[in-house]
Image: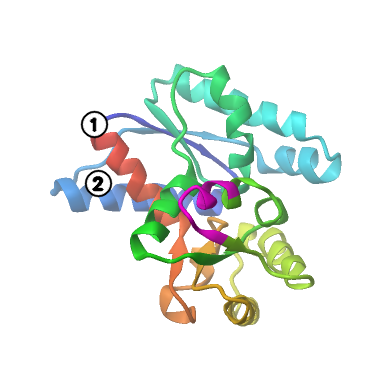
């Protein structure tokens, strides 16, 4: 089984969920008490946020992720998963600098949407995910259109992630607000919704969401075990 490299810490909350799900998936497939070989390089989220939000320094943030990827390569990882959606915007810049591949979270998610046959999905996440190009571009390659919330819903989704979810705080009020936002995406034509922040599946279960939902965390972890076993 190939060694999985994880860039974590963005946040520790979702990184812990990745570790849990990767182990559960491996045990389900291989039986017994099987667990996957993996190594985690945990980025200091405060330094990352200081660069991205405090200084608006995308280059400094990208260097942090590049250094984490290089550390995973030195540690013997066969490929890399990033336990954070928005950080995937740096993959095109970083990939040429390392000798092992990234397993892109939007590719894993797009494959699941395509299998279900949906043509239009809503996307929730932090601003750099909702307002960036990497999800719409990758999904468009599979014939899938992407809708994002209007303002002020984008602000609500983003702020609750930064102020609550990454701090391991999950409230009924935030859960209800997210459901209303998803309903409004449905009114605009979304047939399903991408939970494009790896903490959102910890807030909302599929049963609480009024349309098909795609947990990027779970889909990414399943794809990682596929790749590790291939």
Front residue of 201/120: it is: 120
Residue 218 pos. (x, y %): 40, 56
Q: Give the range drawn in magenta.
A: 137-145
What is the CA distance from the residue labelled 1 to the residue labelled 2? Answer: 10 Å
Front residue of 59/71: it is: 59
Mark 2 highlights which residue? 26
Q: 64 above or below 177?
A: above
Residue drawn at (53%, 55%) of the image: 198
Label 1, secondary structure: give it: loop
Q: Is residue 141 magenta?
A: yes
Residue 56: assigned label: none
Q: Image quadrant for the N terminus? A: top left
Give neighbour class at mark 2: few <14, some 14-19, many 20+ (Cα, 10 Å).
many
Give neighbour class at mark 1: few <14, some 14-19, many 20+ (Cα, 10 Å).
some
Mark 1 highlights which residue? 1
**Tag 1 near tag 2, CB within 8 Å:** yes
Q: Image quadrant for the C terminus? A: top left
Residue drawn at (55%, 72%) of the image: 190
């Amino acid at each position: 089984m190939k060694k999985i490299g994880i860039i974590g810490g963005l946040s520790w909350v979702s990184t812990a969920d990745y570790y849990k799900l990767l182990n559960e998936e491996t045990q389900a497939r291989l039986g017994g008490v099987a667990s996957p070989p993996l190594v985690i390089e945990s980025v200091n989220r405060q330094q990352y946020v200081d660069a991205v939000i405090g200084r608006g320094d995308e280059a400094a943030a990208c260097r942090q992720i590049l250094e984490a990827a290089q550390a995973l390569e030195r540690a013997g990882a066969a490929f890399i998963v990033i336990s954070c959606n928005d950080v995937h915007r740096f993959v095109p810049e970083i990939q040429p600098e390392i000798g092992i591949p990234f397993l892109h979270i939007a590719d894993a998610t797009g494959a699941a949407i395509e299998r279900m046959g949906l043509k239009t999905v809503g996307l929730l996440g932090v601003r750099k995910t909702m307002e960036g190009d990497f999800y719409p571009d990758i999904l468009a390659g599979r014939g899938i259109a992407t809708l994002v919330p209007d303002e002020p819903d984008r602000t609500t989704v983003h702020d609750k992630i930064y102020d609550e979810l990454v701090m391991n705080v999950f409230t009924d009020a935030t859960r209800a607000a997210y459901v209303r936002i998803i309903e409004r995406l449905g009114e605009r034509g979304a047939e399903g919704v991408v939970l494009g922040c790896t903490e959102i599946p910890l807030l909302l279960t599929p049963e609480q969401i009024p349309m098909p939902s795609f947990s990027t965390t779970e889909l990414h972890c399943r794809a990682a075990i596929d790749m590790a076993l291939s």
